[in-house]
Image (spheres, rainbow, N blue to C red):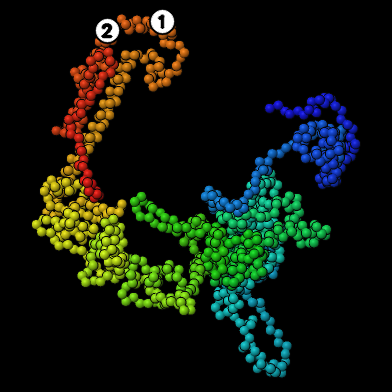
Amino acid sequence: MPPFIPTKRSISPPNRPSPPAKRPATKKQVVQILESSDSSLSDVSSDEERSDVKKPLIKSKGKEDNVDSVENDDHDEESVDWEDAMDTTTPSAYASHATPAQDVEIRDLELTLDPMANVRVTSLLDTKKGPSQIERAIRLNTHKAHVQCLLFHNAIRNAWLNDKKVHDILRGQLPAGIQKEVQRWRVASALDPPPPPPPQKNVDTKTKADKKKGSKKKQAADTRNWGEEAKRLEPGQPDMSHGDPILQLLRVLAAYWKRNFKVTAPGLRKHGYCSAVKLEAIVSSFKNGDHNPLVHGERISDRHEFRILAEKRQGSRDVGAQLFTALLRSLGIEARLVSNLQPLGFGWTKAEVDTSEPVQSSENAKNAVAESSSDEEIGADEEGDAEGKSAKARQLDRDLPFPVYWTEVVSPITHEVIPVDPLILSNPVAATPEMVAAFEPRGGRADKAKQVIAYVVAHSSDATAKDVTTRYLRRQTWPGRTKGYRLPMEKLTIKPFRRGPTYTIDYNWFRETMRGYIRADNQRTAADDIEDAKDLVANQPEKKIVKKETDTLQSLKASTEFVLERFLRREEALRPGAKVVRKFVTGKGDKVKEENVYRRADVLRCLSAESWHKEGRRPKIGEAPLKRVPIRAVTLMRKREVEELERQTGEKPLQGLYASYQTESIIPPPIENGIIPKNEYGNIDCFVPTMVPRGAIHIPWGGTVRICKKLGIDYAEAVTGFEFGSKMAVPVIEGVVVAEENADLVRDAWRADQEVRREKERLAHEKRILQTWRKFVMGLRIMERVRAEYGEDGDAELDNPFQRRRPTGKSADTVQKPPDVERHEHDYEEDEDHYEDANADLGGGFLLPDHDDGTNDFVVEHGDGPQRQKVEASMDVEGENHESDVGDVEMSSPSEEEYEPPPRGSNRRRRRGG
């Protein structure tokens, strides 16, 4: 489509000079704008800017008297020539910045296309539509991958803590007083022998009189003083007079470390799932190599940098806990590195959404880190102090009230585990269960900082790890605060074999993940056995005792223990002598009504005599019905009987219901002389196996009635049930009941009959196949005759009788025939007799009775001997006129008798199995 050119532009001169600028831009103004840190429009008011933009539009249209009409009329705005508008624009601050001066260098325009710029930031929490199955699977796999990455990261840091150079650095920084405390602990724990006491010199300067004075008091004091002169009775045993000696040492070391270690970087924390735009910005800045600790976290690439941090005694809170663990290992104390993993969650709650502030620039981040690392106060303005304090609170992880890394110390005397956190908690050494519970993230501050407890793993110095989450849960009760953040145990159904049984197993994903870190059974220590039997035993949550509520009609109706008599069904009745549990009161005032409450176990199932008969039972003689109910008529005949009784008596007829204990099994009398007893319908009821008379056998095979008739054996059709439909009851008959002496004869005859029947079905099936092949072969011969007669050079579309041909304007007589067609017709007339003889020989394309040459014989083999059969297909061709191409075809039917199934009886009985 050609571009739209307004009328004003088409009639305007091609080289129209632009009017002189009112305020020509100078080089000095451009330099000031470029050098200013603020925006180029900061010096210009909004009203002045609007006037500078509107003036050229008004001037270009020649409508200076009406500014509003230019703004509101869309057609006028589209017809404005934007090039003329820029030429006639009055220069302003914006114009001076947009239009370069003569001395300013014109540079190329750079455009950066950001694919994530127009990505819409949406969250599933803002919409009513929940996450799809694929999104749930992605988040679940992300959670699992993050947990495994954190485990491997901690395993690497745990290996660095065993570095000898790191141990030498940390041990060499200890002052002399702490070294003495360490030596005192080793002696008290019986790890080192006590030093020999220094020699004492006794200088006696008193006189003999002084010695005599107060000698008895001095001797009594010496016998009661167990100070320096007292000696340990059992050398080589630890001194437990003041408790475990390691607790005092840990308090001293924790105070020393908290005073000397400086937090200069942020540690690991849980941010949540952020938007694609923010994630792309973080990844891009990471790839560009511009490391920002506040965005990318603390980076320690190798052991050399880790040793440097050990020398400076600075880093993140996580590094501080790790170096403190290395310090304890350097002193010969068995210490574990404990980590409370903070992985991305697998849920869809608000706690899994990143709500942190936008990314800071690298310069601001470095300045914030520098401010947080220094303890001196730097004078600055009020705004700078506010920003520095907020950055300090964020970058120093002051918003995280609970530690992510800490240390577990194993006492060499009691082999108990003692958690230690020297940097965050007020009580660094957790010597009691209440202090241990302080490590679990709880409260509003923890929820705001997204601190959770899900997987707490302790790494030992021998590169093994252990799940110790149970120790830090409140009352060691599962799931506790881990619910929603830790993958729970699943129940999986396994079927080892296709037809074998199924098994249900408990699958714990984290336990399977920790298999590569756990310690072997032959390397377990005494501390492992003690904590597995004491601290790591999970307690089941206490079941809340539900107070017993008062009875209501709805609760009694849905109760599985108690029932009211009004809620009994038609086929239910109370056992005679049932005891009343309590009374249920309904109504108020004069309308108060009491009902008896019975146990559900006292309710019996009752059926009528007909229903019990279908289950092979009958009421005992002399038993009275336990309950009487109206007759439930299903069939049309039964309804008429009920109506007739109701007209005679004037009341609805009732039928008695009997309980199971009032009935007995139906056992018919044995048969005599091979005669089967029959009912009035000529069959026998066999609803259950016990209803078959003694001396008779039930054969539930279809087609046995015909066999018994052929053999002349007495039988009775077996009725095994009823099917109700169309207001009628249709009996279901399955086989026959015959005498035991005739059962084998009937079975053998039935098997022989089934063999003959299957053979006939096979022959009929083969007959249909041969007929189909015969029809196919005859069609091929007809097609071959047509090709031989009319040739294959003709047009296939013209020869096709099913092809629609387009009518032409010329008649067939006026169309001039080609010379090839005329020559073909002449040849056809000369050889007409030849074609007639050929047609007579071919028989119109069909086979003649005496020219088949045996090629039309189909031999079917049915085995050896007399079962071999030869089927010949013949065809008679009739036709008095030899000019006709195709005659009438008559196919002779085979001599084999077709199998016809026996006609279906007129009765409505349904037979099964036949």
- The foreground one among 637 and 168 is 637
- The picture quadrant where one finds residue 217 is bottom right
Residue drawn at x 18%, y 40% as measured from the top left: 756
Reply above or below: 550 against 755: below
Q: Position of residue 2 (x, y in %)?
A: 71, 26
- The picture quadrant where one finds residue 857 is top left
Reply above or below: 83 against 822: below
Q: Position of residue 643 (x, y in %)?
A: 29, 61
Say which element carries label 1. Answer: helix
Q: Which residue is mark 1?
A: 819
Q: Which residue is mark 2?
A: 833
Quadrant in which the N terminus is drawn: top right
Q: Of callouts 1 and 2, which one flags the residue occurring earlier in the amino acid sequence? A: 1
Residue drawn at x 66%, y 55% as measured from the top left: 355
- The foreground one among 106 and 899 is 899
Query: What is the crowding at mark 1: few (fewer than 14 residues within 10 Å), some, or many (at least 20)?
Result: few
Residue drawn at x 49%, y 70% as measured from the top left: 543
Residue drawn at x 51%, y 59% as measured from the top left: 488
Q: Is residue 458 visible?
A: no
Would you say 59 lies left or right of 852 here?
A: right
Reply above or below: 119 against 531: above
